[in-house]
Amino acid sequence: MPLKVRTIDIFVSSPEDVQKERSLVERVIRSVAAESGVPVTVNYSNWLRKLNVSDKIPAQIGTVSDEGRTWLRPCFWEYQGSRADHEYQEQIPNTGSYDLVICILWSQLGAKLSPAFIMPDGATPKHATEYEIAWVLDQINRTPGFPELRVYRNRSTPRAPVQPRSQRETFFRDWDGVQDFFANWEKKPEFAKACSDYLDLQQFETLFREHFCDFLKRQVDKEIVPRRTSTKGRSWHSDPFRGLRYFDFEHGPIFHGRTKAVGEVVDSLNEQAKAKKPFVLVLGPSGSGKTSLVRAGVLPLLTELATVMGEGPWRRAITRPGSGGDPFGALAAALIADGALPELQEQKSREALRKISADLTENPGSVAMRIGELLDQISVQELDQLLDREKNLSPLPGRIETVELARHRKLRRTKPKAQLAIFIDQLEDLFASGYAPNIQQAYIGAVAALVRSQRVHVIAALRSEFYGSYQQFPGLVELTNPHGRLDLQPPSPEEIARMIRSPAEATGIRFDRDAKTGKHLDEALIEATIASSDSLPLLEHLLSQMHQKQAARKDGLLRWSDYRDLGEFDGALPEHAERTFNALSIEAQQAFEFVMRRLVFLEPDGKPGCRPARYEELVSSHELDSRMKTATQSFINKMVAEGLFNAEPDHRQDLVVQVAHPALLRNWPRFREWLIGEQEFIRMRDRVDGCLKLWLKGGQQTHDLLTPGLGLADGETLLNHFHSSLSDSQVKYIQKSLAGHRKSRLTTYVVLVSVLIALVALATIAAVKRLSAEGRETIML
């Protein structure tokens, strides 16, 4: 007779104030289960949570090939506020029948229950949390060790609402209820033993992962059919280290070490939403990981959560003000991109993009209104789709039947409310790319209009060095009040350890141990990262390089020998760049100067920054002969292949090349030596670029051309001595400026000559009149 699949049922109880923790619990369960090769199927009490098709248990559950093995079935039971529908209350299960019960609490408890609910001692529970705890403890007393109970309590102090009065009173009533609950139940040894405190999301994740790993290991050890090592799964199957590239949305499962900061951003966004301006500014120095934090940390978590503004579904858009030299065009393209709101344009065309860009510039309120209307339509469509899906739900075996949850879902009155999250990456582009003040002000105004619609949540990343620029714009400062500014702190040693070890665990990678010193490589990496100024980009680059080495051997071991051969922590990046350069042909090496002039700018403090350039302009410059065009292409392609350059399409779908990270410029000796003799050229070019952007944005008006003085002198010098290092648009702009100046000079000369002739004529006429008058006087005498 075939063995049945052994199911492990998990009950997760969470009020609405711990949604971040609930989401992390699901992530950890899935991740740890995948690493152990254990399948997972999830049920939700919240009807807006989408069932993952891959979670469904096969119909022939009793005859699956993996007989006698463990299958995890977590059920996430959420309480939305202090009230619940009567029918919903009837569905609350008996927690004593589960293998593991997880309760997460902060400032609220579960919903109030009807008098029909009775606790094991016959008393009436005050709320759902008390009911759940009472029944699980009753079962533990009957069968010691089953179920297992874990209670996680957030010990941080929540921010109490001041207004309106009703919310303030409800908050303190709920808060007092939590204190009374723990004061009462902690008297029971089994409950007190199950409790764990935490202060932030990172601490919670660490606690829960440790506890769940231990729980699952013990469950797997009980399997009737012993597991072979080969059955152990992996939660990630490619390189988990990103080198100089950022972690993106799809890399959320392997983005570790920033959970605390992720929670802080989401909390700040919620607080800002309560203040009716959901905007958060993330400040941090270059290389602190702001982009990865938002792309791979905040956005994946945010789109899983409900906010005070609604439950979702979420759309997301990512933009950068410096993309293509047009911040409004970049924002418009982000809004209509797949995953954002492609429905915003009636038809896909450049004209539609230009129209949205123009509206963002001149009338951003109209765009915000259209976005709100579109999100309302998406909400209705989502509701219809969810209701249609409910009709096709089939029951799954277990202690909570899907059909019962379906009945509860239909009884719920909460409806989807679509939201849009926008991430403005590298906001410093707005201040460092030469945009005129009126363009900067208009862009901030467009962002503010979107935020104040209360349907668009905006997160912006800004380098700390540009804090002064941020303060010069009252509209931007006002957007961040009262709780919308977060200073990203350097990662702690514990966070660095997670950045190194957790992705390795997800892919089954191990760290070598030095035979002489006994030190493990991961320990040395942690120490080196703490001591480095460019810690995160250098760390990720080094880990990726070592991962490539082990992948070639297929031994799953990051070795000390590779670490030393690569140049160790500080030397790995510059040595990689130099090896890549030396492997190029002589002609390709000669393209270094031409390309780097196009890809570098100087910041106000003199530090080099990365600027994008169109690939086509780089490899097809009119100033290059066919041999150098081929060489330039080889140089760029090799740098991109090695991860030292990035090549991605901009909002116009033109392929754009950029240095992968400023850390390369700061750490590559060849570049630093070259920059010494190029600073004056780069400064002149950057000054001209600022005027060029104003000219392009203003419709190429004559009054925006270079004017006599420093600007025109810079342009003439660049055209005469650095023509090959200028883009076509730069050359065109300078030539028009010079032509306009010559025309102006000629016009001035003609006017002056005309004026001189007129003056001479007037003087002659006056002289003739005077002589005539004198002649008449003589005759009369």
Image: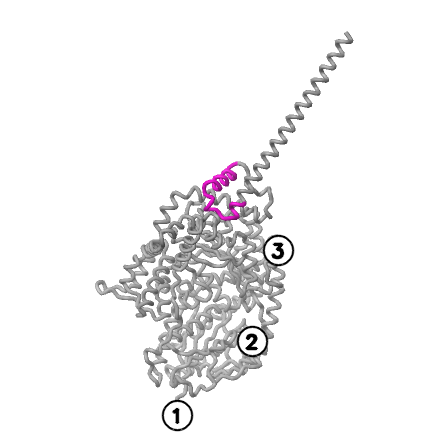
Looking at the picture, how far across and down is residue 435, in whole percent?
Answer: 53, 48
Tag 1, which secondary structure?
loop
Alpha-carbon span between mark 1 and mark 3 = 70 Å
* Residue at 58% across, 81% down: 391
Quadrant position of residue 508: bottom left
Tag 3, which secondary structure?
helix
Q: Quadrant of the C terminus?
A: top right
Q: Residue furthest left?
A: 516
From the viewer's perspective, is the residue at label 2 or at label 1 nearer?
1
Q: Earlier in the sequence, mark 3 or mark 2?
A: 2
Q: Which residues are magenta?
A: 709-732
Alpha-carbon span between mark 2 and mark 1 = 45 Å
- Amino acid type at circle 2 is Ala
From the viewer's perspective, is the residue at label 3 or at label 2 nearer?
3
Residue identified by numbered label 2: 84
Is the residue marked by circle 3 packed among few (<14), some (14-19), or many (20+) residues within 10 Å? Answer: some
* Residue at 41% across, 77% down: 149
Q: Is 714 a magenta residue? A: yes
**Label annotation for residue 622:** none
- Amino acid type at circle 3 is Asp
Tag 2, which secondary structure?
loop
Is the residue marked by circle 1 packed among few (<14), some (14-19), or many (20+) residues within 10 Å? Answer: few
The reply to whether residue 379 is visible in this rendering is yes
| Of residues 14 and 767, the one drawn nearer to the viewer in this rendering | 767
- Amino acid type at circle 1 is Met
Say above or below: 695 vs 528.
above
Residue identified by numbered label 1: 1
Say above or below: 611 vs 737.
below
* Residue at 53% across, 83% down: 394
Looking at the picture, how far across and down is residue 160, in whole percent?
Answer: 51, 62
Residue identified by numbered label 3: 359
